[in-house]
Image (cartoon, rainbow, N blue to C red):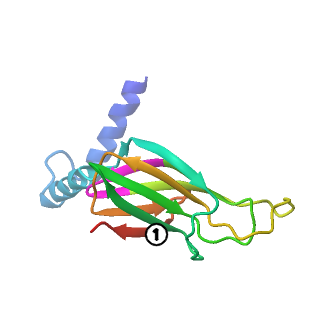
Amino acid sequence: MRRARDLALVATVLAACGGAGAPGPVASTAASASAAASVTERPVVFADVGATTQSGRHVDAPGIEAVRAGSGLRITAHMGEQRSGGYAIRIERITRAGNELRVHAKLTSPGPDAMVTMALTSPAHTVTVDEIADVVVLFDTAGSELARVRIA
């Protein structure tokens, strides 16, 4: 039953594209799809160095730092300066897309009624990877780009 459904789906797609012998535009669409597929993301293994609430980076916005360390990079994701405790940033995964490393981090904020310390904090999380890239980009869990840095 599933195979019949798959064949019906393929037939529908082929019909919508003008059949198996479709002219040029379909071929160029297929070529651009394969080019896009060649820039797919792949997971990158990283080692946790540690997290802190006092990184010393006193900027209001999230940021990313990447420096060469041996044969790879040392990457630090910053949440930015916060007015109280209860904030944190945690790198959950890193992927490579072409010559770009994409750092996906979870940003945590205290709840509206949470009891927190009243002190300025600047949460950060540092990891290392055994890869080099031209660009490192920080994303939140929703996929929004927060910051990027070009490696010199």
Task: Pinpoint residue 134: horizontal percent, then vertical percent.
Answer: 27, 63
- The local crowd at label 1, few if under 14, some if 14 to 19, many if 20 or more residues have their Cα within 10 Å, is some
- The residue sitting at 41% across, 43% down in the picture is 46
Picture quarter with the N terminus: top left
Q: Position of residue 117 (x, y in %)?
A: 80, 63
Is residue 95 in the magenta section? Answer: yes
- Relative placement, left or right, of 22 versus 91 is left
The reply, left or right, for residue 77 in relation to residue 97 is right
Q: Nearer the viewer, residue 2 or 29?
A: 29
Quarter of the view holding residue 28: bottom left
In this picture, is 37 found above or below 2?
Answer: below
Type of secondary structure dominating the magenta stretch: strand
Side of 79 relative to 99 (left or right)? right
Q: Position of residue 34 (x, y in %)?
A: 21, 50
Q: Nearer the viewer, residue 15 or 130?
A: 130
Q: Identity of the amino acid at label 1?
A: Ala
Query: Disc 1 on helix, strand or loop?
Result: strand
Q: Where 43 falls versus 101 (above or below)? A: above
Residue 124 point in image, percent of width and height: 56, 59
Q: Quadrant of residue 65?
A: bottom left
Report the span colored magenta.
93-101
Q: Is residue 1 left or right of residue 82?
A: left
Q: Residue lying at the far top in this picture: please name it.
A: 1
| Residue at the (26%, 57%) spot, across then down | 99
Residue at image position (46%, 69%) is 147
Q: Quadrant of the C terminus?
A: bottom left
- For the point 51% across and 64% down, the residue is 144
State the residue position of label 1: 147
